[in-house]
Amino acid sequence: MQGNAFANFTQADMNIESRAPVVSARADARREQILEAAEACFREFGFHNASISKICKRAAMSPGHVYHYFENKEAIIEGIVRRKADVILARVDSMRTAPDMLDATLGRAGESVAEKLEHDFASLDIEILAEACRSPGVARIVSAADGEVRRNFKHVVRSLRRDLGFDDSEAIIDAVADMVAALFDGMTVRGVRHPDLRRDEVFGVFAKVLRFLIVDAR
């Protein structure tokens, strides 16, 4: 009896484990569905006018279903910011592992600039930053994500500078990372103010400025 009971328990346990990835994948898909709906609503209505009911309608879900995954709109913003940060972190990681780190850094930068010049990306970014100016909670979310990206990018800057023979202080590495971040942040605003800018020429000049910051900063 005990042997059969143990066998039954083991099989049940295995069934649960086999279902776990499916359940997890379904939950991830639901979260993505909500985040995409929220992004669309934030862009169209602004953060405060994008009610949970509007997000539910766009996501084709009930309020209870949405609240199952996100406690409130601030939690949804955290999910959006997390997703954006993960994309950037993946790019930074590809820079760190590339055979030619400098070429990879300049190449991946072009992808980020192109993304930031897209209207949908820029409008959502600016909406979140505007809310960060009003809400301490959102400000902490944005600052935490920025800090994580900066820490990882600083490893790239430090490695590149060491390869060039520089032994920089932490203050110099911080300054270079902040100036690079300011360049990228500025492209978001520039894309909104001047949507018809000459992208190819801007990409070329941007790469030269980025190279100067990394290679020639003192």
Image: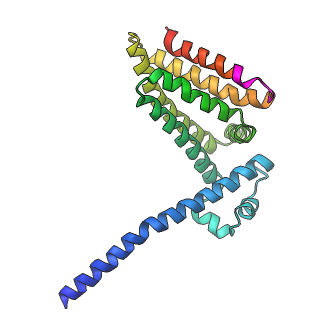
Rendered residue at 28%/81% (across/down):
9
Rendered residue at 18%/86% (across/down):
3
Q: Position of residue 103 (x, y in %)?
A: 50, 22
Q: On the picture, is 25 further left or further right than 54?
A: left
Q: Nearer the viewer, residue 90 or 178?
A: 90
Rendered residue at 40%/26% (across/down):
99
Q: Quadrant of residue 155?
A: top left
Q: Is residue 56 above or below residue 112?
A: below
Q: On the picture, is 126 further left or further right than 5?
A: right
Q: Quadrant of the N terminus?
A: bottom left
Q: On the picture, is 134 further left or further right than 176?
A: right
Q: Position of residue 57 (x, y in %)?
A: 75, 64
Furthest-bottom residue in this view: 1
Q: Position of residue 174 (x, y in %)?
A: 49, 21
Q: Position of residue 36 (x, y in %)?
A: 66, 53
Rendered residue at 23%/82% (across/down):
6
Q: Is residue 119 above or below residue 24?
A: above
Residue 190 appears in the figure: yes
Q: Which colour scheme appears in the figure?
A: rainbow
Q: Nearer the viewer, residue 73 or 211?
A: 211
Question: Does the magenta portion include 161?
Answer: no
Q: On the picture, is 1 further left or further right than 129?
A: left
Specify start and end residues of the magenta stretch as a single range. Answer: 195-201
Q: Nearer the viewer, residue 21 or 149?
A: 21
Q: Is residue 23 above or below residue 200?
A: below
Give the number of callouts: 0
Q: Is residue 4 above or below residue 181?
A: below
Residue 72 appears in the figure: no
